[in-house]
Structure formats: structure tokens, C-alpha cells
Amino acid sequence: MLRKISVLMCSMVLISCAEKDSYDPAHDYFSYANTDQFFTRHIALDLDVDFESRTLRGSVVLHLDALDSSAELIVLDTRDITVQSAIFYIADGATEVGDFTLSEADDVKGTALHIKVPAGVDMDSEIVLGIEYETSPGASALQWLPPELTAGGKHPMMFSQSQSIHARSWVPLQDTPAVRITYEAVIRTPPELLAVMSANNDPLTPRQGVYRFDMPQPIPAYLLAIAVGNLYFAPLGEDTGVYTEPELLDASAYEFANTQDMLDVAEEQFGPYQWGRYDLLVLPPSFPFGGMENPRLSFLTPSLLAGDRSLVSVVAHELAHSWSGNLVTNATWRDGWLNEGMTSYLESRLMEIIYDKDRVDEERVLAYEELLGNFDVVPLERQWLAPRLESGDADDVQGTIHYHKGQLFLQYLENQFGREKFDEFLFAYFEAFAFKTITTEEFVDYLEEYLLDPNPNTVTREQVEVWMYQPGLPDNAPIPSSKTLSNAAELATAWALGEASLEDVPVAQWSPQALIHFINSLPDDLAQEKLQQLDAGLGLSDTGNAEIARTWFIQVATRRFEPAYQRLEAHLTHYGRARLVTPIYGALAANGHDADLAAELFDKGRDGYHPLTVNYIERALQRAAE
């Protein structure tokens, strides 16, 4: 049932984070890097990809500016990296060895690499530091797939996932979004495989085992990305295309055929696309997310290949990141809503044009319902758009609150000021902060100067700060609605009561979102024989749509509908996307009877999951046990 969550914190005094004791909202508590003393501008990678040892070996050369001439140590972020040497390159080809030490490892932050700056280094010039190193086979950013876990079954594959703080597990660097770097790379692979990166991939690159890349626009470390495998390319438009294994190429080209049109529409809506090409990379099922917005090359899950282009909103989301996130980046992870909330809003605007407003309203309602579910489990202090974030894990602090609450906040501003005025503000915002990082407080200051003050008596700064620094939703938050989904919910109730038959359920005319809402609207006490009838009549356990399957199998696990457990297990072993499997494990473990089964299925499937997915599932099982 839809409901509005009001802020129930009237006894709290609303103050900004900056006013609370020694907490600094602009400081990245998930990085060791001393960015106040040294700041990286550029890195150069030279790496060998070794599938046998499941490691990257080689070097990174960092080009840094010294911000404090008295500083004696450069501190970098690492995780499970073996450092062989640190060399400073001095003028005229001279070098000096940099003594280094590694701190004790932290479970979340990894290990700080301290490098002493030799006396001969000129602190008034660019500092060039070379580090020889090797990654660990268990690097948290990298997944090494044997041939049998790829679509073709003949060649291995490796891919990265650097967000949030996992770049440090394959490159020693300042791993904080506050630092933007340009980069170049030389990547050596087995000659039969192709390497791609979040850089200038040439679709006509021949396979020859040595690949060179350049990223001239500065990006944060979490957007460093690499993949190596039996990859081929298909064009989608003048500036767009898709890479994947040959077995998935035709299906991927069909599913994402409208990507060029999406890019053209996005430029009309949000301003010039400043990244050159926009290509996609469809990875094996173990990729942990729906998509990752690596610039120039979005990484995607194959679970989007529904065959009917019904899940392409994920592509719209990753493309929208080319403005919100990639172009203008959150300075720390407590400001993540500036990436994900803004992008979710932009995604909905794109989808209005690609589909229509009714279809987008369906997705908005489902996102709102997911937000309410998050409010039930996420602690109050983590429900702020910009929470106080100095502990915990950067990967798991807000659920999806920063996505959906952030989107609602921006929709609220659009509603209050009108789309025309709000669009003018967005264009100016992207231009003002292009290729920069920004804190929540800087955004609010900019919003006040360029939208609130010029339009008095519309929205106050105090109203904005309620969104930023209080839990739940303000009383005047916009609540999305959808006539189609309301009808689906009514039909679910009528069918459950025997007042309608399955023949009355117009699945062929519905979007996947409507069927998802129908499933979620079934009463809690629905009899097992009704579940059997529903599954047999609609083929839910055998659906090819991963989002519908996710929704159904959560219900299967929650309701202990054991006739579908075999197909549930097949779903868990086929997909590795965290969204598609984690809540099912959690529902199994929490239903009062199947905690051991959830653990058993996890043991069977974990070798096929990315390290990040493994982490999410372990947390879900732990929460269910508490």
C-alpha cells in the first residue's frame, strides 16, 4: 500500500553536518590519501594481464602536485597489493628510490602506502612517482572468470568494478572521488583476447596482445575500468556501439539498438556530451550490477537482454551519468545522491521521451515503493540524503535511498519551480561544475544563489536542508502515481479473492512493471494452491525477464512456495547481479525455516559471484540471522 513517510524527528534541531563537533563533511573518511598535501593529476599504467595467476603485474606512474612543500610522505590507498618498488623520476633522467612502508590492513579501507619523498625531489615542480606492483588473485575490484563461466566457454575473461573504493585493489593511488585524473595505459594480454578500458577504445583495434589507451578528460578513480576477453564489436550508431562475446553480440545489438537515439536526446536535454564515443560492454552474468557508468564504455549485465527492449532504462541511467557523476562528481561518498539521485532523475526525463510519461510513472512508483522498503531497514541517521559518513562501508550505507530520495528531491524542485526554470538551472549547474567534484553543501549554496534567491517565496534553504539532513521524506514530497499500476493492484486483490480469473489479467498488454506490481500486491495470506495456479498460468518461474523473476522468487522465498524452489535455485546460480539474487537469499534466510537452505545455496553458487556480490549476500544473511 502506498503511503507517505513523514519526518518524525521534530525533537531534533536541524543543523548542517559542518556544525557538528569535528566532523568534516568535505573529508573522505574512506581514503588514506593525504590530498591536502599532494594531488594526483595524471597516471600512466603498464600492466600484464596474467590469467594463470589471476594477477595484474606492472607499474603505475603518478604525476602529482605538491600542495605542501614541507610534506615528507606521499600516502596512497592500496588493498591486497604487493609493492616491489617506488621510484621518483627527477629532471634529466635521474631517479631516486623512495622508501616505503605499508600500514596495518583495515577490513574496509585496505592498507595505506607511505612513500618517503627524497630530499632531491623538487617540490615546486611536478612530482613523478613510479610504483612497481602486483595485484592479488582476490583483488576486490577484479573478477577472473574461467572459460566455463563465459558465454562462449572457450576463453577466460577478466573485468573490473572499481566503485566505490575498489580501484585501490588494482592500482595504488589516491582512491577518492575528490581527486580527478587523466590516464594512459599499456595493457598486455594473450594475443587472442581483446582489452577495453574506460578510455578511447577504437572499434577497429586489431587483436595483437598489446593495447594502448588514453583518457584525456579527468575522472575519479572509481571510474577506472578494464575488461579483457573474447570480445567483439557491433556498431549501434555513428558514435555508439556494443562490445561483448560473439555469442551475445546479435542479441545485444538488438536490445540496445536505440542507444544512439538515446544519446542524441540526452544532448538535447542536458547539454553537449563531452566524452567522445559512448559504447556499451555486455559482460557475463556474474557482473554484480545492472550497469556501471565507466566513461565512454558503460559496463552492463546480460540480465538486460530480455528480448523486448523492456529493461533499457538501465542504459538510460548509465548514459545520464555522463553528466551527473562523470562530468560533475560527488566529492565524497556521503554526497553520493549527487551522482545517483541526479542520474535517476535524468533517467526518468530521458525515458519520458523514449517511451511516454505513463510508462515512466510506473517505474517511479516502483522506485518509491523500494524507497519505503529501504526506510524500514536503513537506520534513521543513514536516511539523510547527505548522511554523516565516517564509518561503515562505502558500498553499503543507504540501500538505494540516495537514488530514489534524491530523484524525489529533484522532482520536488521541478514541480515547485516549473520544468523550464529547473532545466535552466540544471544546464548552468553542469556547465559550472564540469570536470569538478562537489559536496552537498556546495550544491545547496549554488542552488540557493541561482534558483532559490532569484525565485523568492517558492522553496527556502531550510526546506532543502530537511531533505539533506533529516530521515524519511518531508510532508510535501511528491508521491508518484500510476493508473496502470493501481489497476494492477486492484486486479491482484480481485484475483486473490476469486472475483477475477487469470484470463482477466492482461499480461500481454502490460509492461513488466505492471506485472511486477501485480505480484507485489498479492495479499500476504494467499494460499499455496493459488500461488501454484498463478505460476502455472503466467509462467513466472520460467520468465525470461530477470526483473520479473527477481520479484517472483522473492515472493517464492518469503511465502515458502516450495514447488518453485528448483527454479529459484536455477535463478540464483545463473545470475550474479547483486540486485537479482541478494534479496532472494535474504528472504529465504528470514522466512523462519530456510536459513540453512539459503546458506547451502550460497555455498554452491558463490564461486560464480563477483566479490562485491558475495559481500552483499553475506550481509543479507547476517541481517536475517540477527
Image: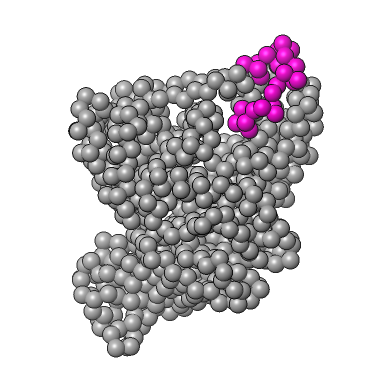
* Residue at 57% from the left image edge and 52% from the top image edge: 300
Q: Position of residue 237 (x, y in %)?
A: 54, 55
Is residue 32 inside the magenta stretch? no
| Start-end of magenta stretch | 490-514
Total labels: the figure holds 0
Q: Position of residue 68 (x, y in %)?
A: 21, 67
Q: Position of residue 537 (x, y in %)?
A: 78, 26
Q: Is residue 40 visible?
A: yes
* Residue at 66% from the left image edge and 27% from the top image edge: 509
Horizontal relation, residue 262 to residue 310: left or right: left
In depth, the one of 521 and 139 nearer the eye is 521
Residue situated furthest top in the rendering: 499
In depth, the one of 287 and 375 nearer the eye is 287
In the figure, residue 189 lies in which quadrant? bottom right
* Residue at 19% from the left image edge and 33% from the top image edge: 453
In depth, the one of 309 and 434 nearer the eye is 309
Q: Is residue 17 visible?
A: no
In depth, the one of 145 and 188 nearer the eye is 188
Q: Quadrant of the N terminus?
A: top right
Compared with residue 545, is residue 414 higher up or lower down, i.e. above or below? above
